[in-house]
Amino acid sequence: MALLEVSGISKSFSGLKAVQNVTFDVPEGKIVALIGPNGAGKTTCFNLIAGVYQPDTGSITLNGARIDGRRPDEICKAGIGRTFQIVKPFAGLSVLDNVVVGALNSASSIIEARRKADEVLEILGLAPKRLQPASTLTLPDRKRLEVARALATQPKLLLLDEVMAGLRPTEVDQIVSVLLDLNKRGLTILLIEHVMRAVMALSGNVIVLHHGELISRGTPDEIAKDPKVLECYLGEEAL
Amino acid sequence: MKLLFDGVSGRALILLALFFAVLAAAPLFVNDYLLVVLITILYFAYAGQCWNIMMGFAGQLSLGHALYIGLGAYVTAALYVKFGVSPWIGLVPAMIIAGAVGAVIGFLAFRFGVSGVYFAILTIAFAEFARIGFDHFSWVGGAAGYFLPVANYTQNDLLNLRGSQRMFYYIVFAMTVIAFIICHLLLRSRAGYYWLAIRESPEAAEALGINVFRYKMYAVVLSAAMTSLGGVIFAFFYNNLFPEQVFHISRSIEIILGPIIGGIGTLFGPIVGAFLLTGLAEGLREVMLRLGIDLPGVKQVFYGLCLLGVVMFLPEGVWPSLKKKLGLDRGNEGS
């Protein structure tokens, strides 16, 4: 049984079918990438898993337990941490306090949460900026803060929504090595990513969405040769 | 105790102790008039502090806090006048009723996704509802007002809150100090962190495992119950209650001006704001009196100008910049 099993989920927004009958799973200990052109329904998929929206049909299970229809905070408690594509830092709080809020999800006291938060900040290289207000961070740092905050909740499964977008190649490599390291320590990751450099480095398992439907899945090499994938990215004439 | 002083610099502690010491000793030096001004200031500091829990911490704008003041005032006054119940006992049902009303408003709003400006309007609606309701509630005097028996008390009756202004001063002073300490501890608690997170971004807070509905409810109920204590003082100090005054929206606005001018979400903002506003307004009144100018409404104009100045030049309020000047800024949150 895979850690996360998504089967047959659909979601429409007043007639627009954002996600249609999508089925995939994320095995424990793996890194799975979700790719697809803009508007393919990747973020909607994430929001369905994270409980922001309820799926119209289908089911989502984590460790065999149904999580669809639960609230976002319940899903976080169940063990799924997420980042937001459009970052949502607690702007008025310090970087440390941002992460402390996340750490309180599993910590029993403020002191314990601070300790955990400091560990996470160290991992993501934000430790020198821990006392700055989050509003003073640059975009790459804000993305890192998103990851730090989600990681501090101590999830079994981490959902990353385009955390590499807008980062320089060296910064991408940095985050990639952090994620690989976390994965080695047992963290399962599902990520949405446009930066193929990161996808290739991280994941042996790619899922492609197009117009809300799953059109292909496999290793990066298999995906790159799949005519359906080429068609949706490059158009029919390219073939 | 460790939690109480954690992250507070020695310099801040000394200044804080000095400030409270001066306030504690003030009645020995000031005349009756100034004492009343100080009582008013501390009353607004207290009420502002309570309001700040909802708006400053949890980000929920209430424009109807006069509702909780009024409920506290009417409940304790009626229990005292009709049944001889000491206000110290009466404040228990008062806080429960105010908290329950806060819970109803919170439930209606948060359950059905009423937020922002619409939430603020809902709080006004409930306060207005109470104002009109109490106007017709003849058991406690209706529109004609409700009066507490006044006599010349030769000694302070602390049990029934009958006595000198000095006694009231120390009670409000104690309330202000206690509310300050409670808020300080709250900000360092799980609830405090969660409130700030909800204030900054409810979606992100939810994604981090925070039950946003529950913590918003905590903030509203706590703020309402604490505010109602201010109403107890209001009733027993002024000895008369008129729905048109107690529940009026201008009362709610008066409560929130202090924290806005002092600094929303800060611990000292409500206190600094109350001192600035009431202190300066009373000073202005005194000057006008000396000059023989009688202009009704000058206080309101003055409040408006203060608000304008703060919004334009110190959008975070007076306290954050004052804090920097005093050398208390350590890049930390809170105090």
Image (cartoon, helix red, strand yellow):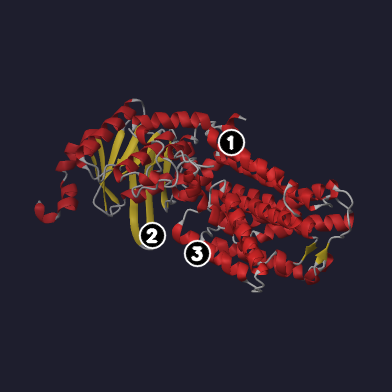
Q: Quadrant of the C terminus of chain B?
A: top right
Q: Residues within 10 Å of mark 2 (few under 14, many from 20)?
A: few
Instruction: Quote the CA–CA distance across marks 3 and 2.
Output: 43 Å
Q: Quadrant of the N terminus of chain B?
A: top right
Instruction: Name above or below for residue B219 compared with residue B234.
Output: above
The reply to whether label 3 and label 1 mark residues of one chain is: yes
Give the residue number, with chain letter if any, for mark 1.
B14
Q: Chain of mark 2?
A: A
Q: Residues within 10 Å of mark 3 (few under 14, many from 20)?
A: some
Give the residue number, with chain letter if any, for mark 3.
B308
Instruction: Quote the CA–CA distance across marks 3 and 1.
Output: 33 Å
C-beta proximity under 8 Å, tags 1 and 2: no
Residue located at (86% from left, 48% from top):
B157
- Identify the image quadrant of residue B146: bottom right
Residue located at (15% from left, 47% from top):
A227
Q: Chain of mark 1?
A: B
Q: Is residue B61 left or right of residue A220?
A: right
Q: Which mark is residue A83?
A: none
Q: Secondary structure at mark 1?
A: helix
Hey, which residue is sitting farthest top in the picture?
A: A185
Q: Amino acid at mark 1?
A: Ile
